[in-house]
Image: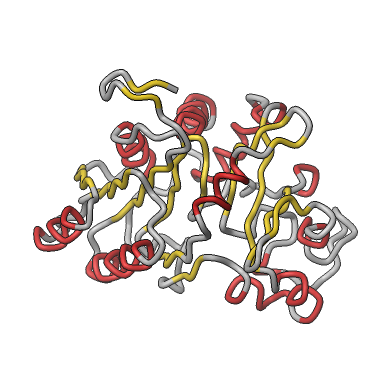
Amino acid sequence: MYNVSRGIELKNTIGCLILATCHASKVRWVQKVEKSISENDIFDEKVLAVDEFNNMFFPARVKKYFEEKGWKVIIDNHKSRTKSMLNGLAELSTDYVFYSEDDVLVDLPSKEFILDNLKHKIGDLECGMLSLNLGGTTSTISNMGGSNSNTGSKNGDLDFAKENMIIQNDTSFSFRRLEEKRNAWFYEFPGLFMPRELMADTINKSKEKFKGMQIEMALTSAWFYFNFDKKYYKASVAKNNLLDILEKNPLLASDNCRHLTNLDKTQGAFVYGGNPSL
């Protein structure tokens, strides 16, 4: 990849895109998110994309705080998650992007580990999604523990994490996710690494074909409708205790085995407004 505006060849660069809104709780949380990222800042560029709506505004002091930490802050007013994402992606010039949100603390693995996974091929397939989440399977963390008639397994494709392991280090391992055991949220937020241009492409394709659908469901639909799965695979990263936790009590996996920590216990309920659809 060559960046004409900078006149340099990009190699192994990762950008960070955090989406933020302006509710008072979110403004407090997003500063904690930034501090969690700073603890192991692996990023070459960082963008905070803020959507101001419902007469709420992003405080100038918080904007200054982020800018002093090396973030580019862009502020829009359109009540649209996808517009903010696309505007944020347009501000980045990196090979890869990490997308997350203003209410999730991040315990980032090393840059070497992330890049090794993003560049790993399985047969002819490239890594298209590397998630720090464990969802997207037919029996997700939230409803684990019972038999699933569609898969014959208790915990969806997580039951096959060991045999689908890709790379392991002292703290974590990655594993391929199984498309045949997917649910409607196979393409999942937050905490997702992708090739930057691929993320923008999938968002635009989903807007073209699945407008009005919940965003992750639309992106999942577009991923398979436009045959991205024929070129790319999805992997997740978990802490090394995942296999033991799944055996003892799968309901503990989300809190104990991810590299993410939810600050918002209502996450996904959209109690702060905004538009979760395309």
Tell me, what colour scheme is on the image?
secondary structure
User: In this orientation, which residue lies closer to the viewer: 260 or 7?
Assistant: 7
Residue occupying the far bottom of the picture? 248
Instruction: Point out the image quarter for the C terminus.
Output: top left
At a point 35% along the width and 44% down the height, the residue shown is: 44
> Could you tell me residue 137's position as x and y percent?
71, 54
* Placement of 228 over or under 60, stated as above or below: above
Q: How many marks?
A: 0
Q: Farthest residue toward the top? A: 4
Could you say which is closer to the camera, residue 36 or residue 23? 36
Expressed as whole percent of the image width and height from the top left, the position of residue 247 reads 81, 76
Quarter-of-image position of residue 148: bottom right
The answer to which image quadrant residue 57 occupies is: bottom left
Q: Position of residue 75 (x, y in %)?
A: 19, 45
Q: Is residue 16 left or right of residue 70?
A: right
User: Which quadrant holds the N terminus?
Assistant: top left
Left/right of residue 65 with respect to residue 143 in the rendered view? left
Q: Residue at x 29, y 35 (%)?
A: 91
Give residue 234's position: percent from left, percent from top: 66, 43
Q: State the residue at coordinates (77%, 76%).
A: 244
Residue at the spot x=27%, y=56% of the render? 21
Furthest residue in direction right, as rendered = 152
